[in-house]
Structures are given as structure tokens and as C-alpha cells.
Amino acid sequence: MEPIPRSDSRAQYIARNDQVGRSELDDFVRDRHRWVLVTTRRDGRVQMSPLSGGLLPDGRLITSTYPQRAKVANVRGNAQVSVMVLSDEWNGAWVQVDGQAEVLDLPDAVDDFVEYYRSISGEHPDWDEYRQAMVEQGKCLIRVEVTGWGPIASGGFPESMFEPES
């Protein structure tokens, strides 16, 4: 097969795997809130949970859920988790982040909910109302200390299909 010219419209879909440092990782994750949390069940199989999450100012990841959910039981049993952070568009870039998770329960976690909200949506018009809603709903948080990550990747055509860059 003849190499495809870089001017071809398909060149915008060349697969990428960009190794990045921590600051670049944080820049990538900060505005992306569509995640898949991967935990381990008691029988050793994985549990994948689509959810919304945010990056805290200290670099930890955080999401809100309910204590009765399987992901919470899994984290309590095995704190090693992975999070796939997705772009909003289907063909967008993504990254796998690995870490150690902890469950934050109410009432102790009530102020942590403020940081969770801020990491996704900024300021709330009434923080007391928001805190009360979290208490009434009986929510909890999962917070992840990042221990490693893969490349920021995107699917697409192998670069070898295209002419070398000049």
C-alpha cells in the first residue's frame, strides 16, 4: 500500500500515545469529567462504573456516589483502582490513571463535598443548601491518590500508514 499523504483528511485521525508528566496529566484531566472507575470485586473480576469525577487542587481524583453501590464495597475491600478519563467526543483522547482509593463517609465528609463540587462545577450559589442535600441523600465520596498513569492516547489509524513527517 502506498503511504497516505499527511495532507489527507484521515491524517487528523492518526492514533496517538503521548507520555506526559504529572502537570500535563492534571491539565488533561482537569476539564474532563466523564470517567470509568475500575474496581475489583471479591471474586477477582473487575467492576466498571461510568461516572462523573473531578480533579482536586492537590492532584487527587474524586467522585460522589452512594454507600450501597458495588464500587464502594469494592473499594472498601481493595483500594487499588483505575480510572479511565474520557474526552467529551467519542474519538477524543483518553488516559488511564491508577491509584489508591478511599471512601469518605458522612458526616465527616460534608466539607469534602464542597471540594468535589468545585472540581466539576465551580462555585455553588448556596453551600449550606448543597451540604444539606448531600446529607439528606446519604451520599459518600471516593477519593483517589494517583500512583501512576499511562499515555494520553487516542484511537485511529496507525501512523505507519502515512508519509513520514517532513
Image (cartoon, rainbow, N blue to C red):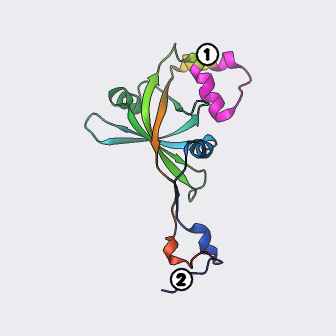
Q: Does the magenta stretch include residue 83?
A: no
Give whichever of discs 1 and 2 has the lower sequence position. Answer: 2
Which image quadrant: the C terminus? bottom right
Residue tagged by mark 2? Answer: 3
103 left or right of 91? left
Image quadrant in which you'd find residue 128: top right
Residue reaching furthest left?
43
What type of secondary structure mainly makes up the magenta span? Answer: helix
Q: CA–CA distance between discs 1 and 2? A: 61 Å
Residue reaching furthest right?
125
Residue at x-position 72% and y-position 27%: 123
Whole-percent x, y for residue 29 in the image: 58, 43
Whole-percent x, y for residue 161 in the image: 51, 77
Q: What stretch is highlighted in magenta?
A: 112-130
Residue at x-position 52% and y-position 71%: 159
Whole-percent x, y for residue 95 in the image: 51, 49
Q: Which of marks 1 and 2 is in front?
A: 2
Q: Which of 26 and 38 is in front in this view?
A: 26
**100, above or below 34, in the image:** above
- Which numbered circle lies on residue 132? 1
Check disc 2: other Cα within 10 Å, few if <14, some if 14-19, many if 20+: few
- Which numbered circle lies on residue 91? none
Q: Which of 147 and 117 is in front in this view?
A: 147
At label 2, the amino acid type is: Pro
Q: Nearer the viewer, residue 63 or 69?
A: 63
Whole-percent x, y for residue 17 in the image: 51, 59
Q: Can see residue 68?
A: yes
At label 1, the amino acid type is: Gln
Find numbered disc 2 in the image and state the secondary structure of the residue it sits on: loop
Q: Can see residue 37?
A: no
Image quadrant in which you'd find residue 14: bottom right
Residue at x-position 53% and y-position 83%: 3
